[in-house]
Amino acid sequence: MTAIDLGYVVQLAFLIGAAFFALGLHQMNSPATARRGNRLSATGMTIAVVAELIYVGYRGVEPGNWLIIGGGMVVGGAIGLRMARTVAMTSMPQLVSLFNAVGGGAAGLLAIDDFIRLSSQRTPEGALAALDGWLIFFILVDVIVGSVTFTGSLIASAKLMGRLKGQPIVFPGGRLLSAVALVLAISCSIVLVLSGTGLFNYDASVMDLLLMVALASALVFGVTMVLPIGGADMPVVISLLNAFTGSAVAMAGFVVGNVILIVAGALVGASGAILTKLMADAMNRSIANILVGGFGAAEGSQAALTGAGGTVREVSVDDAAIQLAYASKVVIVPGYGLAVAQAQHGVRELADLLEARGVDVSYAIHPVAGRMPGHMNVLLAEANVPYPQLKEMDEINPEFERTDVALVVGANDVTNPAARTDRSSPIFGMPILDVDHARSIIVMKRSMGRGYAGIDNPLYVNPKTGMYFADAKAGLAKLIAAIKAQ
């Protein structure tokens, strides 16, 4: 088989891999088929990687290069496998952010390598004979987007891990620095693109300097863009950075002429952008407003932070057990506290116990509950919670008025009625789960501490609310034992 014939086979393999990506993404529309979709996508990537390795091997690769390729795959694969298998569900958002950083950084490095390699083919006069304006454009977009994604994802991960405080981090001149970094990155990119068209004819050292300035500016902008964003916005930020990663990968595909990178990056970029818009809508805020920062600020409105007022009513485990055991309809509202305590199996056991007593049980899933898109879905899927019981916000909200008991386990901001009534609240206008419409409410949490947005929750002083103070895992275990004793 000639190199040309093998090239056609490789392109066919890429198209098959792209088809697997599209089918896999479609399967991820539903929690019931998401695992199958993930496997389809992984299969498509395996086909593409194997085909590319065969083609590269046929064309001839230096032994040292094979060592680098093989070593990178083994080491990277081992690290990725270990991280994926050992990560706690509470740390899944951080892991996703780190993977975003790796993807964006890899795409950016690939573009830099191509720029250096191609720019070395200058004519003696210094003209970029091997480059054209569009190719330079794709390279620079890849470098800038990949760099912003890299540093931005690292900052988001640090916030989620607690290495940086979750509230907006603002420092004097921060926004000016962001603006300067963005203008520098764009300006240098414009000059480089025009150089590719032959309009300018700079010395090679000047061209390399412009690229480095654009790179450094983009790295700085990634940091200054995410630092002022509050922790409550992290799910949206992660989704946005995921879209950036996809865009960077697609640009890298244009640079190296690889169709599988273009398709995979476009799918990730488009789906990430759509998800970002849906999540911003779920918070009743624009993406621009989120990027400006301020949500979850420690200095939020004084009215929101001075206390909700009213009296907190505490309930014992036996009181909570009686309410749940003799209810007809129970809605469980999971939140980040459930993930922290690794209590997903306990909540599933509680639901099974209640269903055995004839109770109708369902789960209310808010779009931005937890620390990443779909966090609660993934958490409950790990405990094999039946998918039909997972109800999205628009579907479950009308049912709260017919609900005997709403059991809130670790959720805070997504159940806060201040979003509907308090115009001074930083979350005013954000759609929430209408937990306060239930006939009775049990809130399980360790203390009266505030949620990630840093504001009080009037739900806790609602006369219908009983506060069951306990760690989610231990509290659910006691609750299950008390119901069995009924």
Image (spheres, helix red, strand yellow):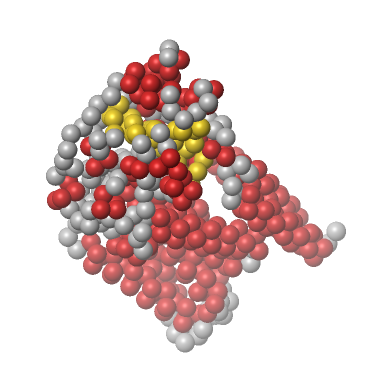
Q: Position of residue 78 (x, y in %)?
A: 56, 36
- Residue drawn where x is 46% and y is 30% of the image: 328
Q: Quadrant of residue 463?
A: top left
- Residue drawn where x is 54% and y is 58% of the image: 271
In the displayed image of the protein, which residue is found farthest to the bottom?
A: 199
Quick check: 118 left or right of 100? Answer: right
**237, 140: nearer the viewer:** 237
Question: Is any atom of residue 426 visible in this view?
Answer: yes
**453, 322: nearer the viewer:** 322
Image height of 72 relative to 203, above or below: above
Quick check: 37 left or right of 395? Answer: right
Question: Is any atom of residue 153 visible in this view?
Answer: no
Image height of 440 relative to 323, above or below: below
Total tally of numbered discs in the picture: 0
Quick check: 435 left or right of 256? Answer: left
- Residue drawn where x is 61% and y is 42% of the image: 32
Image height of 291 relative to 396, above or below: below
Question: Which corner quadrant holds the N terminus?
Answer: bottom right
Q: Position of residue 134 (x, y in %)?
A: 54, 77
In the displayed image of the protein, which residue is found farthest to the right?
A: 1
Question: Which corner quadrant holds the C terminus?
Answer: top left
**249, 239: nearer the viewer:** 239
Q: Position of residue 359 (x, y in %)?
A: 50, 28
- Residue drawn where x is 43% and y is 65% of the image: 144
